[in-house]
Image (cartoon, rainbow, N blue to C red):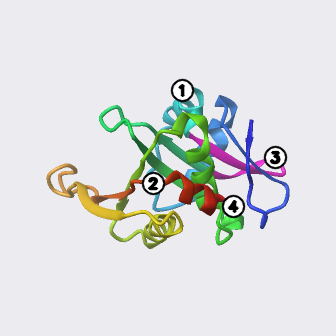
Amino acid sequence: MSDAAPASMPGLQLRRPVAEDGPAITALIARCPPLDRNSAYCNLIQCAHFADQCIVAEKDGRIVGWVSGHRPPSDPHAFFVWQVAVAVEGRGKGLASRMIGALLARPAQQDATHLTTTVTDDNDASWALFRGLARAWDAPFERSVLFDNQTHFAGAHATEYQARIGPIDRSKFQQAQG
């Protein structure tokens, strides 16, 4: 099943990942600092076990976008965005927003009332993306510490702030999806 693709990138296909996409996804993430590089095995598991909560953007047989996510068991009405990676040629075209919108529009996420993610303080592109989604969906946006630099990472990683969008009004969401 294919998801809607951005009009600004003709020939682009948004689709569920398959395990065979794992190496290309791992390579894309490596080209998108400051994203944490998960193991290749982690990316394979996401493609195989969480395909309904992940999406790839493919153009001319090459993966140019990836969003991974899941539905947290502790917050069943939330959709958690784990990683967003967009290749250089896909940036500035609204691809990340379209991939996230396509994920939320899938039947597996129809009852999600909130979108959550974590972002380090210095990741301006991610903050702009998630604040922009909240504005487009006319939904509240909250920011709070989720994993503290000292308490959770023993000083080895920057504090991860949770961005929480919602509740999401599905009619406003559908309007924004166009």
Residue 49 marker: 1
Q: Looking at the picture, which amino acid does disc 3 mark?
A: Gly
Sooner in the amino-acid sequence: mark 4 or mark 3: 3
Mark with earlier residue (1, 2): 1
Q: Residue at x 46, y 49 (%)?
A: 81
Please name the residue that numbered disc 4 is placed on: 178
Q: Can you tell which of label 4 and label 1 is closer to the viewer?
A: 4
Seen at 29% across and 34% down, the residue is 74
Judged from this view, the residue extending furthest toward the left is 151
Looking at the image, residue 120 sits to the left or right of residue 103; the answer is left
Above or below, comparing residue 127 to residue 152 in the picture: below
Helix, strand or loop under label 1: helix
* In the rendered image, the vertical position of residue 146 relative to residue 108, given as above or below: below
Report the residue marked by disc 3. 61
Identified by mark 1, the residue type is His
Q: Main secondary structure of the magenta part?
A: strand
From which residue to which does the magenta span run? Answer: 54-65
The quadrant in which the C terminus is found is bottom right
Can residue 30 be seen?
no
Q: How many angstroms separate mark 3 from mark 2 (CA)? A: 34 Å
Amino acid on which the number 2 mark rests in the picture: Ile
